[in-house]
């Protein structure tokens, strides 16, 4: 009869729509991202239960044997969500109970999906952040190497989109490296926020069983347990802190990429992008399109946006256990590591391969009169003028040579006239001296203070950057070594249960 189509039975879990829109995607996400971590947690928890006497040796051995069999028998990739078990955790528990009866449920003693979930997320995140820190370190080293090679290569530095002063490509790149190292330090600090274990918090208040939280942390490669049990479940600052720090390198590197687009433009022509990184127009054969710049720019923006998505999802959520920080958000956040990794690998290939077009740099230096600041500085030092008086003379000189379409180095007569007009006396600078102090090489050479572009100042900076990079990579290595050692310790401890 009309309206007698199959109706949903709202008394039976799960509702089909809830299954399709929430439970199925979450189940698939666990298979893809968290199954290995769950196996680690199961093994470590079983070892801890046995060592504390919460489980007797025969029971612990039976559970260990069954767990090993289930891991061997289960092809995780082929599992599908049927609704029979709410999530993958219950799939494993059901398999244990099939093999062992009621004993199969003993593995869940003194733990909850709450502390398991946050531990799973930390295990997955710490692998990804270590990989990303390695990519950042590789990029920093390649840019540092490029900066040393280019420490005497002149470029035009821009402010407010206009030619400003001469510097060197090495000086520019060292500024990029300096910011990158600070970004790495922030991300390294956020990575430390992943190194304390929630296991033992159970639902939110720990347990009445004599659990050993320190042992669980050791077996899973953490520095120690995260102390407050409520905070283990409710405080998601390890997520917000990590993604906030992860965002920053891509915001900052995106600005560098934007510069590369300007520098490579036909009108500026300061950066030459090699043919391997250029695509030719399909209709205009003369056009060299450095499209990797566009891909790096949008990958950086996409990554920053994905980080914002994760952090903003936590906004105005209750300070307690809630799904807003869990499965789907975690899985979506992993995409930031993927797009970010692609961007970093492309930038590492791109920038070291590019060259500075020295002819165009010289052309733009002359056309924009960008060494004029050093003329004003020289007048202060050599002629005893105030800087404002020297600035006025330099401005008059620049106006005259630009109007004449001549480089500043050929503007001695215009300078001499401006000097006499402003001071009432002739300058003591010779034409030869004028040509030296208005050259780009001289401009760079006299700026030898810390942080300047002169070779000695840059060499000192390079040494400091190399030291900072080494320190950061050593910190990452310590974490990685602890994780690897914990895996070996867990394997050994689990094997002891099997042999007991």
Image: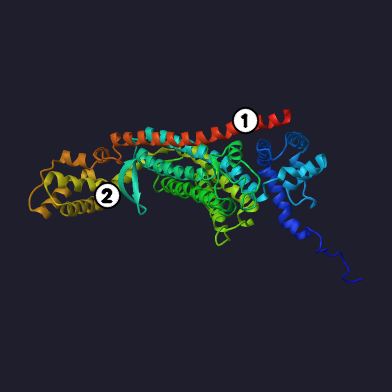
x%, y% of residue 453? 30, 39
x%, y% of residue 301? 52, 51
Residue located farthest toward the bottom when viewing the structure as drawn: 2
Name the secondary structure under disc 2: loop
Q: Quadrant of residue 7?
A: bottom right
Of the residues tagged 1 and 2, which is closer to the observer? 1
First in residue order: circle 1 vs circle 2? 2
Residue name at image x 24 percent, y 51 percent: 404
* Number of dots carrying numbers: 2
Q: Which residue is mark 2?
A: 405
Visible residue check, residue 316: yes
Determine which of the numbered discs, if any, sits on residue 458 in the image: none
Residue name at image x 7 percent, y 53 percent: 424
Out of 218 and 20, give the one closest to the viewer: 218
x%, y% of residue 386? 14, 52
Mark 1 and mark 2 residues within 8 Å of each other at the beta carbon? no
Visible residue check, residue 277: no
The Cα atoms of the two marked residues, 1 and 2, are separated by 72 Å
Q: Which residue is mark 1?
A: 488
Q: Quadrant of the C terminus?
A: top right
Q: Quadrant of residue 168?
A: top left
x%, y% of residue 460? 32, 34
Q: Residues within 10 Å of mark 2 (few under 14, many from 20)?
A: few
Out of 233 and 301, give the one closest to the viewer: 233
Residue name at image x 12 percent, y 55 percent: 422
Out of 61 and 4, give the one closest to the viewer: 61
Q: Quadrant of the N terminus?
A: bottom right
Q: Quadrant of residue 409?
A: top left
Name the secondary structure under disc 1: helix
Residue located farthest toward the top when viewing the structure as drawn: 499
Q: Residues within 10 Å of mark 1 (few under 14, many from 20)?
A: few
Q: Is residue 339 left or right of residue 151?
A: right
């Amino acid at each position: 009869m009309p309206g007698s189509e199959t109706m949903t039975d709202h008394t039976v879990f799960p509702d089909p729509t809830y299954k399709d829109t929430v439970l199925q995607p979450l189940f698939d996400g666990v298979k893809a991202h968290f199954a290995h971590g769950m196996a680690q947690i199961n093994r470590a928890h079983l070892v801890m239960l046995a060592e504390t006497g919460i489980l007797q040796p025969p029971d612990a051995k039976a559970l260990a044997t069954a767990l090993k069999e289930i891991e061997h028998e289960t092809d995780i990739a082929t599992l599908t969500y049927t609704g029979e078990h709410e999530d993958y955790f219950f799939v494993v528990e059901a398999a244990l109970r099939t093999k062992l009866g009621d004993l199969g449920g003993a593995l869940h003693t003194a733990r909850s999906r709450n502390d398991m979930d946050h531990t799973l997320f930390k295990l997955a995140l710490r692998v990804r952040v270590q990989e990303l820190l390695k990519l950042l370190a590789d990029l920093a080293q390649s840019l540092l190497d490029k900066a040393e090679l280019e420490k005497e290569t002149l470029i035009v530095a821009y402010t407010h989109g206009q030619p400003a002063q001469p510097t060197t490509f090495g000086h520019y790149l060292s500024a990029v490296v300096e910011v990158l190292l600070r970004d790495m330090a922030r991300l390294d600090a956020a990575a430390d926020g992943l190194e304390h274990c929630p296991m033992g918090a159970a639902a939110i208040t720990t347990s009445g069983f004599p659990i050993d939280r320190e042992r669980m942390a050791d077996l899973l490669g953490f520095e120690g347990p995260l102390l407050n049990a409520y905070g283990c479940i409710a405080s998601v600052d390890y997520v917000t802190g990590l993604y906030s720090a992860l965002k920053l390198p891509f915001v900052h590197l995106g600005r560098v990429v934007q510069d590369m687009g300007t520098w490579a433009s036909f009108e500026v022509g300061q950066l030459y992008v090699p043919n391997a990184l250029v695509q030719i127009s399909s209709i205009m054969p003369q056009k060299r399109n450095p499209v990797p710049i566009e891909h790096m720019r949008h990958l950086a923006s996409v990554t920053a946006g994905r980080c914002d998505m994760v952090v903003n999802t936590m906004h105005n959520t209750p300070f307690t256990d809630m799904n807003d920080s869990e499965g789907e958000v975690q899985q979506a956040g992993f995409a930031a590591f993927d797009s970010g990794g692609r961007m970093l690998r492309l930038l590492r290939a791109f920038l070291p391969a590019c060259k500075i077009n020295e002819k165009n740099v010289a052309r733009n230096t002359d056309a924009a009169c960008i060494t004029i600041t050093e003329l004003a500085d020289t007048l202060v030092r050599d002629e005893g003028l105030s800087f404002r008086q020297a600035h006025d003379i330099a401005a008059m000189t620049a106006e005259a040579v630009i109007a004449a379409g001549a480089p500043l180095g050929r503007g001695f007569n215009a300078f001499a006239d401006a000097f006499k007009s402003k001071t009432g006396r002739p300058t003591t600078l010779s034409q030869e001296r004028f040509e030296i102090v208005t050259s780009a090489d001289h401009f760079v050479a006299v700026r030898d203070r810390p942080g300047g572009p002169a070779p000695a100042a840059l060499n000192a900076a390079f040494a400091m950057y190399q030291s900072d990079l080494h320190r950061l990579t050593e910190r990452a290595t310590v974490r990685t070594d602890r994780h690897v050692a914990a895996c070996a310790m867990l394997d050994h401890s689990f094997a002891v249960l099997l042999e007991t």
